[in-house]
Image: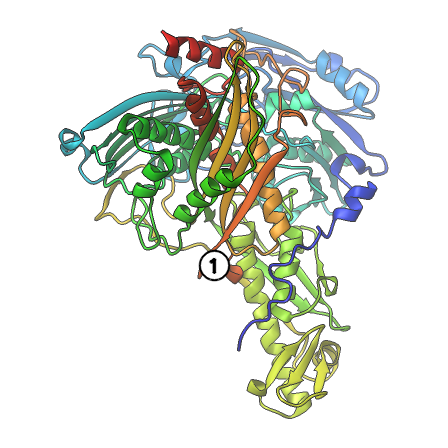
Amino acid sequence: MSVATSTIGASYPRIEAKDKIAGDARYVDDLSLPGQLYAAIAQSPYAHAKIISIDTSEAEALPGVRAIVTGAEGKFPRVGGVLKDETMLAVGKVCYVGEPVAAVAARDYATAQLAAQLIRVEYEPLPVVLSIDEALAPDAPLLHENFAQYVRTMEGGSRDNIVWESELTEGNPDQVWDQCEVILENTFETQAQQHGYMETNGVLAQIDSSGKITLVASCQSAHHVQIRVAEELGMPMSKIRVQVPRVGGGFGGKHATNIHSIAAWLARETCKPVKLVLSRTLDMEIQRSRHPARITIKTGATKDGTLLARDIDITLDGGAYADESANVLAFAMLMARGPYRIPHVRIRGRAVYTNKLRAGSFRGFGNPQATFASESQIDEMAAALSIDPIEFRLKNAVEAKDRWIGGHTLETCQLKNCLTAVRDAQAKAAPLPKPTPGKKRGIGFSSLTHISGLMGTSASVHLRTDGTVAVNTGCVDIGQGSDTVMAQLAAGVLNIGLERVTYAPQDTDLSPYNWKTAGSRSTYMTGRSVVAATMIVKNKILEHASELMECDVKDLELGEGGVVKLIGVPGKQVTFKEVALRSFFKAGGPVFGFDGFVFDGERFDPKRSLIRNLAFDNLGIYTFGAQCVEVEVDELTGKVEVLRAWSAQDAGRAINPVAVEGQIQGAFAQGLGYALYEQLIWDDDGRLANPSLADYKVPGLYDVPSVIVPIIVEDPDPTGPFGAKGVGEIAMAGVAPAVANAIANATGARVRRLPMTPERVSDAIDGALQ
């Protein structure tokens, strides 16, 4: 029996939109509890130093101080994903400026802040490592002397200051270079980028009389926070409850963080609610950044434009702690070949420790770094071969049923259609007025690829007594609109309006498990569980209806608006309410459905690839896209303005087209910041020099082009919910290389370092003229 789809493909407004517009949406900082205390953090002034002693006596004597916690006793376990190398507060030494050393709970925020300043810490400064080269130097100081004792959840290569290293080889690259008629080798560099979410990290923790701690947290996964807090506090997960209010953005920067455990620890010590909301400066100093990267790519091709070989070397600056470095590195390696048929590839990667803020997951997860390097060089190769850059990409593009590096089969692939879509859209656009003297225009393209998938998820769906439906998942909406999409999916299966579906907020005591909102996985992964659970409900509804109408199930179909109809007999029907009342009070029991699964697609094929120490090898399905930008470059100042942009996205099937368009446009704007403006800068002593939005430039209204044309390309994936794929991250990955390629098209100058500031563009122009 076919599945009803009345809400699928409809551009519904966000179900929470009215609350947000009216100012009724509640975020962590909007919440308060009777008798709550406020927390503040004492930070390290050194990038690398031993902690000799911590004196809290002066702070403890301050009226209003209720508790102080430090790492002096060494009582915190080391935690982390792949590598457990970090503690809630610094123990024994500090590894970056701003690292939390102690935390205070007091009656008000001002008192807590003052008390934190009164904590006296004696340090013994140690040599500082602030760059990839310094970390890899033969005489570099070891930043983690006890590295060998750290617990690992996966085996992987590491040594000295190298957190993780991997190698991936396919084909025989060493044997084919002499067959390549054109060979290019270039090095590209990318910067640390701040996540830039509107709401900073925050948490409100309280403890009840049974000793159970409840945290209301701005996060990307209630379950992930629960796991980490339980581990850091040495408590069973049954004693940790996490609830998620509205979340003002995340982009990877709000998976589990040490502030949740700090607040929980202080709440347990004081038996009072404790609120800890970071200022913008504090958030920028102690949370996470995107990994800076240095990528060297050597590519070989024949004169007819056939790509034969690529050799890629990737080094990531992981900062002071491992966090997600191993996984980000692995994914960057998987993306570095690009979405092209290149039979002979070797990719080497490493992530290193430095005395800077830890780098972690960030929208794109290593892909923007790899794609900047890969797609920039693809244009350079096209120019060297005198081939149109789109035609060069089309000639070498992967297609459906091709296999990705490592062996994953591409069930669907609309890369070629996306490339031609942006090319044709730009060609048909109305011509712009001619540039003023001293400015040049250029057009740039890039191919895109990403994944949808990862880890485990689940969903439950219940039919209520009035015939409406309740959907419950652990998927946190951090602004991407997943609440609406999950409701649409359930409504689509049951052929009911969205107003008949309620979607529950996330609560670890009530919500089924979901790994986290990351990896463009919400619609593809949790959506699959929602559809599967709702199908169970649908089948039970039909079974009850067949009993009520005394007919066979196969003679029934779902009508619109919550009814079951007898096929071919007008007016013969029962309502969902009638079915629900029968199930609750007469026969069968309440109607509900549950589904849970873990992604388990194709793994690497050892017959095709040599893989060493890859942090994971089974991610998800692949998605594709393409971008085109028009830029104007001031030849004197080097200032770049993006005038118009087109971004085509293979969405599989767009469950909510307007939401997909918003994701494409938002990702492009964030990618533009990465390309031209955003960069965290550290002083020579390791202090972050621009920890505020006054000094850290993000794109403003006049920086983002007024024309960002989203193009949705649909080719339903057989494994996705109604064929849908993820769209959250991919559109960011190709912005920087598209802009770089447009600059080169306009001026002949190639910029290989991000951000492409006016100074760097001007220097590149000067170099091209010499």
Q: Amino acid at mark 1?
A: Pro
> Which residue is at the front of the view, 74 or 529?
529
Q: Position of residue 404 (x, y in %)?
A: 32, 46
Q: Is residue 766 visible?
A: yes
Quadrant location of the C terminus?
top left
Above or below for 181 versus 50: below
Q: Who's the residue at 57% across and 28% down the image?
A: 643
Residue 170 appears at what percent x and percent y? 23, 40
SS of the residue at dot 1? loop
Residue bearing the label numbered 1 = 716
Seen in the image, is 580 located left or right of residue 161? right
Of residues 486 and 508, the one drawn nearer to the viewer in this rendering? 486
Q: At which x and y percent is residue 730? A: 49, 41
Number of marks: 1
Q: By what rule are the colours in the image chosen?
A: rainbow
Asked if 231 appears above or below 75 in the picture, the reply is: below
Residue 116: image location, x then y, percent: 71, 17
Quadrant of res 2:
bottom right
Q: Residues within 10 Å of mark 1 (few under 14, many from 20)?
A: many
Point 54% across, 8% down: residue: 683
Q: Is residue 419 left or right of residue 3?
A: left
Locate residue 692 relative to residue 623 in the image: left or right: right
Task: Kindly tell me whether residue 75 is visible in this rendering.
Answer: no
Determine whether 682 is above or below 162 in the image: above
* The residue positioned farthest toward the right in the image shown: 34
Between 296 and 768, the one lying in front of the other is: 768
Q: Which residue is found at the position 59% from the left and 60% from the top? A: 459
As drawn, 76 above or below 620: above
Is 212 or 614 nearer to us in this picture? 614
Which quadrant of the view contains residue 576? bottom right
